[in-house]
Image (tube, rainbow, N blue to C red):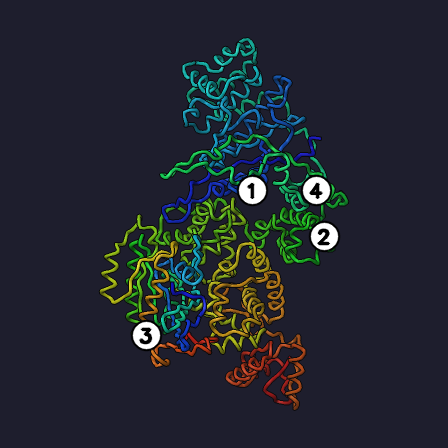
């Protein structure tokens, strides 16, 4: 797996680009947003993951062939009431993962709303991924894979069914996003991508623009 | 001596769920031991002269449950002498009295037998182990059968039976007291068969006597009590008497008056729960004693592994479920007696007007004081007295709580601090907690994630109670809505009042308007915004350097502090820390949380100053170990040294501060100094002496500029006087002889 705790210089590649991306997780509460992040960042899974109030922030670095991608991840609260806070987190984000729970049809409906909102309000170049979480509970499935895939294709979203519990597709979905994100030279894209030199690894950033 | 043993422990294993089974929601099944722990909390509340008080239910390793309960005298089964008619009536009356209370509370005993009815030399009777059936969810959570076969009623044998099965067992017990032990040498299954054959009999009691060649003895039983036995031993459960009837009938027959025993004075006269608590603090160890007596035997884990596991799942060999271990280990209180032997008898009865202040442990940190036997001895007795006098002692309780609160009575003290009064039970009873609402889904997904490391809150019982509390609160506060976090906020109250939902509810109801006024409005953005702004001001007031740095890196409280204040930190800290935080909160009042937030920043100060945005926000996403004792101390210091009007918020229920200058510095009480020609020197001197600097100007803009300049220069305790120079002029005209813009007090 291509994940790494910290940016490492692959053998024989003297010049590695470091790209920083802001990624936000959205979705109905208790679909497993925090669990996905926790699995991705720390490789852990907590059965009784506490609910998120406001938002939580974590970072993780992925190594691609010639680039190191650092994700600054905003994990948001799922409850509808916290909706008004969401723009604060997705503003300026280059990527979003919209999560739903495959055992609950309503959460899929909510995910669609989030996608709509992102398409309308977020940066136009944002890469959106749809994650059907809790695939370990396939026996209780209420949202068909094909249905979600069709919806994702229609809207140009990345799509995977994931399981934070078994770790299935968790790293993959982040990797897929990393691959799809433009890793242009120099921070020309006004969205806030920052390409740094490996030497001055990100100490402080101004991600909240 | 009989008196030496006040309580005893027994132990058993709860049922083990096979392997990796998950519930329908994908979460692991609740372990049986957790269910037992949750259910048994209710038993801990029962106090009745004929029931042994349950003192503690401990969850050990590998699903082990240890039950600690009061004991007296010895079991009926251990008495070899025969009892007289009067004695039997007396025993029966007391059993019926205890059973009546249980049945009134819908608790079925099911295991009533001669080895769990205790009798002491004074003729007092107490039932022991009466909660086994209840705590094990009718035996479903344990791998062994409950009860002794010869006391089973026919319907209980075939798997049914309600409370009236206890009446049958009661009948058998009285019958045995007259004609001796029944089915003495029979194994369980023949015994059960014998009982089942009774269903054809018109008078089972007589038939049993005949089968035991004791018909003459049976006929010799005085008619009134024989009537009682026959009313109990009816085949049809519906025909049996109830304990209510039995008790009133027996009370008339009983010639002995129960209140002959003189109340014990001194240590042994203290509440049993207190004795047990102090005994533990003094080093008493329930598990060690059980091990010493062989009730807990440690065998190598490999011995409990199955010998073989077949490919399709079933296992062969390994440890199989044992029967219920009926042994008990009794505990002597000598340890505690010795520890407290030097305490003069008068100290057991503290007088309201003779309050002691000079405890040795006073200088120690709170956490250590909570573990100090002697200190807790004095504090508990003192609080017991104060709580007894509540509400008249409310003021006194508040000033004592300022020092510390004994953990054993924290629930009571919190309720007193919140002013909980009146018939809260009826009020709570009347609230509809069942009708489904739109919020239910959200509550249902949040509860299984709320403080689930806590054994009480993670079981089914805890989940049900929390849901009821939330629904009740939402229904009685229609102006508010459910915000995630309300669950965390409710949890500490439930944790402390697990068996007193009404009080948990009353506490929550009193807490919110005081500390979180309007926070749960559907649109609470203005309230939160104000709160966070105040918090940020307090941070700048006390920690200017840190505030400046955080401001510079764009690290705003909206990104991390919402869960802090919306839940009064109950979402960010574990319960054992929250209780200490809230102890202070309830005493100091609603502005303290602002300073708690500041104290947390101060504790992380060095790291924060060295970090950029990402590191800072990461630090708060994964809040490191905060020293709560230190945080409480610092926040109280800051809170008390900050002019009240500085932390005043518009969205509050607190009365407005009656300062003519609104900004709250009572100018009349302080020496005010105008800066004079050498303003720089005066200012530096003031900063050095850590004075509060009040900036007053003719224009608000100027005052703000200058004050933020001072903050940037890392000057602490800077504030702006609302109304500026004009306000100053009105109140202290003499100050304006030199006509300067800035004044220092």
Point out the frontmost of discs 1 and 2: 1
* Cα separation between marks 2 and 4: 24 Å
User: For residue B361, which quarter of the picture?
Assistant: bottom right
Camera sees residue B395: no
Sequence-wise, which precedes: disc 1 or disc 4? 1
The answer to whether the residue labelled 3 contacts the one labelled 2, judged by CB atoms less than 8 Å apart, is no
Q: Secondary structure at mark 3?
A: loop
- For disc 1, the marked residue is B58
Mark 1 chain: B
Tag 2 subunit? B
> Disc 1 or 2, which lies upstream in sequence?
1
Q: Is residue B159 left or right of residue B366?
A: left
Q: Residue at x 46, y 78 (%)?
A: A199
Is B301 situated above or below A149? Answer: above
Q: Nearer the viewer, mark 3 or mark 4?
A: 3
Q: Which residue is mark 3?
A: A182
Tell me the quadrant of the picture where the N terminus of chain B can be found: top right
Q: Nearer the viewer, mark 1 or mark 3?
A: 3
Q: Are marks 2 and 4 in contact (CB under 8 Å)?
A: no
Quadrant of the image containing the C terminus of chain B: bottom right
Measured in 3D between alpha carbons, the distance from the residue under mark 1 to the one under mark 3, in whole angstroms, is 58 Å
Instruction: Kindly check if marks 1 and 4 are in contact, taking CB atoms under 8 A apart as contact.
Output: no
The residue pinned by badge 2 equals B355
From the image, state whether disc 3 or disc 2 is nearer to you: 3
* CA distance separating discs 3 and 4: 72 Å
Separation of residues labelled 1 and 4 (CA atoms): 21 Å
Quadrant of residue A106 within the rendered picture: bottom left
Q: Which residue is mark 4?
A: B336
Q: Position of residue A20 (x, y in %)?
A: 40, 73
Above or below, comparing residue B262 to residue B214 in the picture: below
x and y percentages locating residue B692 in the rendered image: 62, 77
Q: Nearer the viewer, residue B194 or B635?
A: B194
């Amino acid at each position: 797996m291509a994940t790494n705790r910290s940016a490492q210089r692959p053998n024989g590649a003297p010049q590695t680009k470091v790209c920083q991306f802001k990624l936000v997780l959205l979705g109905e509460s208790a679909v497993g947003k925090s669990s996905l992040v926790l699995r991705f960042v720390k490789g852990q899974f907590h059965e009784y993951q506490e609910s998120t109030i406001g938002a939580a922030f974590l970072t993780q670095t992925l190594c691609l062939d010639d680039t190191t991608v650092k994700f600054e991840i905003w994990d948001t609260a799922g409850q509808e009431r916290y909706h008004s806070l969401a723009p604060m987190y997705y503003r300026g984000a280059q990527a979003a993962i919209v999560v739903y729970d495959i055992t609950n049809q309503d959460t899929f409906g909510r995910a669609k709303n989030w996608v709509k909102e992102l398409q309308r309000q977020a940066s136009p170049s944002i890469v959106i991924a749809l994650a059907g979480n809790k695939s370990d509970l396939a026996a209780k499935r209420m949202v068909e894979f094909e249905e979600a895939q069709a919806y994702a294709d229609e809207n140009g979203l990345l799509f995977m069914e994931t399981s934070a519990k078994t770790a299935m597709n968790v790293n993959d979905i982040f990797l897929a996003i990393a691959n799809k994100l433009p890793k242009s030279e120099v921070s020309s894209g006004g969205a806030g991508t920052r390409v740094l030199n490996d030497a001055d690894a990100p100490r402080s950033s101004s991600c909240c623009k | 001596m009989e008196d030496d043993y006040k309580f005893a422990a027994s132990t058993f294993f709860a049922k083990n769920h096979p392997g990796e089974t998950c519930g329908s929601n994908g979460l692991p099944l609740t372990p049986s031991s957790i269910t037992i722990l949750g259910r048994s909390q209710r038993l801990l509340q029962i106090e009745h002269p004929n029931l042994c008080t349950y003192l503690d239910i401990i969850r050990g390793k590998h699903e082990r449950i240890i039950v600690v309960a009061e004991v007296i005298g010895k079991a009926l089964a251990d008495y070899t002498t025969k009892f007289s008619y009067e004695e039997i009536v007396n025993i029966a009356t007391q059993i019926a009295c205890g059973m009546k209370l249980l049945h009134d509370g819908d608790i079925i005993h099911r295991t009533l037998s001669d080895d769990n009815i205790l009798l002491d030399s004074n003729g007092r009777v107490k039932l022991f182990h009466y909660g086994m059936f209840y705590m094990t969810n009718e035996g479903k959570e344990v791998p062994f059968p409950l009860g002794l076969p010869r006391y089973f009623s026919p319907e209980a044998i075939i798997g049914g039976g309600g409370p009236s099965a206890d009446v049958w067992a009661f009948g058998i017990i009285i019958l045995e007291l007259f004609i001796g032990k029944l089915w003495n040498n029979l194994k369980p299954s023949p015994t059960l068969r014998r009982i089942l054959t009774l269903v054809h009999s018109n008078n089972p009691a007589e038939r049993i006597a005949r089968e035991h060649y004791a018909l003459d003895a049976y006929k010799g039983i005085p008619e009134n009590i024989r009537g009682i036995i026959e009313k109990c031993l009816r085949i049809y459960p519906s025909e049996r008497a109830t304990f209510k009837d039995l008790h009133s009938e027996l009370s008339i027959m009983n010639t002995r008056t129960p209140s002959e025993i003189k109340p014990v004075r001194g240590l042994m006269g203290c509440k049993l729960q207190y004795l047990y608590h102090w005994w533990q603090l003094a080093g008493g160890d329930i598990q060690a004693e059980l091990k010493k007596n062989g009730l807990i035997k440690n065998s190598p884990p490999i011995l409990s592994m199955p010998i073989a596991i077949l490919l399709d799942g079933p296992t062969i060999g390994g440890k199989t479920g044992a029967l219920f271990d009926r042994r008990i280990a009794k505990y002597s209180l000598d340890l505690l007696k010795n520890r407290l032997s030097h305490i003069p008898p008068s100290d057991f009865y503290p007088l309201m007007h003779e309050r002691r202040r000079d405890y040795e442990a006073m200088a120690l940190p709170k956490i250590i004081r909570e573990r100090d036997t002697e200190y807790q001895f004095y504090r508990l007795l003192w609080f017991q007295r104060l709580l007894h006098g509540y509400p008249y002692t409310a003021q006194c309780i508040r000033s004592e709580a300022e020092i510390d609160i004994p953990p054993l009575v924290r629930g009571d003290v919190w309720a007193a601090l919140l002013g909980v009064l009146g018939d809260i039970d009826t009020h709570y009873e009347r609230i509809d907690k069942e009708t489904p609402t739109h919020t239910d889904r959200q509550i249902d997904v949040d509860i299984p994630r709320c403080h689930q490391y806590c054994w009480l809150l993670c079981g089914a019982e805890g989940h049900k109670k929390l849901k009821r509390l939330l629904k009740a609160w939402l229904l009685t506060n229609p102006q508010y809505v459910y915000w995630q976090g309300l669950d965390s906020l409710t949890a500490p109250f439930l944790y402390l009042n697990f068996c007193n939902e009404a009080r948990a509810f009353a506490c929550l109801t009193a807490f919110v308007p005081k500390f979180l006024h309007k926070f749960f409005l559907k649109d609470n953005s203005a309230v939160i915004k104000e709160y966070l702004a105040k918090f940020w001001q307090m941070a700048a007031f006390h920690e200017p350097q840190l505030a400046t740095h955080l401001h510079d890196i764009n690290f705003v409280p909206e990104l991390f502090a919402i869960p802090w204040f919306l839940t009064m930190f109950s979402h960010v800290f574990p319960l054992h820390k929250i209780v200490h935080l809230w102890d202070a909160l309830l005493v100091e009042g609603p502005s303290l949380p602002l300073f708690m937030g500041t104290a947390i920043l101060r504790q992380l100060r060095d790291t924060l100053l060295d970090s950029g945005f990402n590191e800072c926000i990461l630090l708060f996403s994964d809040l490191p170990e905060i020293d709560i004792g230190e945080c409480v101390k610092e926040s109280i210091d800051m809170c008390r040294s900050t002019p009240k009007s500085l932390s005043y918020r518009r969205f509050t229920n607190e009365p407005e501060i009656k300062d003519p200058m609104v900004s709250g510095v009572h100018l009349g009480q302080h020496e005010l100094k105008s800066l004079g020609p050498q303003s720089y020197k005066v200012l530096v001197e003031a900063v050095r002496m850590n004075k509060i600097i009040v900036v007053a100007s003719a224009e608000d803009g100027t005052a703000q500029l200058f004050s933020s300049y001072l903050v940037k220069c890392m000057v602490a305790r800077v504030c702006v006087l609302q109304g500026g120079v004009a306000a100053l002029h009105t109140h202290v005209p003499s100050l304006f002889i030199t006509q300067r813009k800035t004044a220092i007090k």
